[in-house]
Image (tube, grey):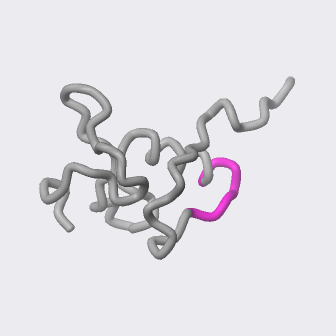
């Protein structure tokens, strides 16, 4: 699937572009990151990676649309 071949996010079925000029992000589920997903899904994948949660597998796409954000990461006091 090439980046220019679709305008809906394959991960959540929402639009890839969230604002003018938005190109989305590359999904972490593939090494090449050549599957373009929307910004909220890209953040969800980054948060999952940062806190050690497994990625959402392709066979569970599209997801429910509930995205993790950096606000969901526990704060480290120090």
Q: Is residue 47 visible?
A: yes
Vertical arrangement, residue 36 with respect to residue 24, above or below? below
Q: Is residue 18 found left or right of 21 in the rendered image?
A: right
Image location (x, y in percent) of residue 16: 29, 44
Which residue reaches farthest right? 78
Q: Quadrant of the N terminus?
A: bottom left
x 45%, y 47%: residue: 41
Magenta stretch, residue numbers: 49-55
Q: Is residue 7 found left or right of 11 in the rendered image?
A: left
Image location (x, y in percent) of residue 13: 36, 53
Q: Quadrant of the C terminus?
A: top right
| Residue 74 on the magenta segment | no
Of residues 35 and 8, the one drawn nearer to the viewer in this rendering: 8
Of residues 65 and 35, the one drawn nearer to the viewer in this rendering: 65
Image location (x, y in percent) of residue 27: 39, 57
| Residue 51 on the magenta segment | yes
Which residue reaches farthest left? 4
């Amino acid at each position: 699937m090439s980046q220019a071949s679709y305008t809906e996010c394959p991960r959540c079925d929402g639009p890839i572009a969230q604002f003018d000029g938005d190109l989305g992000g590359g999904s972490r589920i593939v090494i090449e990151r050549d599957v373009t997903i929307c910004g909220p899904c890209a953040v969800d994948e980054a948060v999952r990676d940062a806190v050690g949660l497994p990625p959402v597998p392709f066979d569970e796409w599209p997801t429910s649309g509930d995205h993790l954000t950096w606000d969901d990461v526990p704060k480290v006091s120090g």
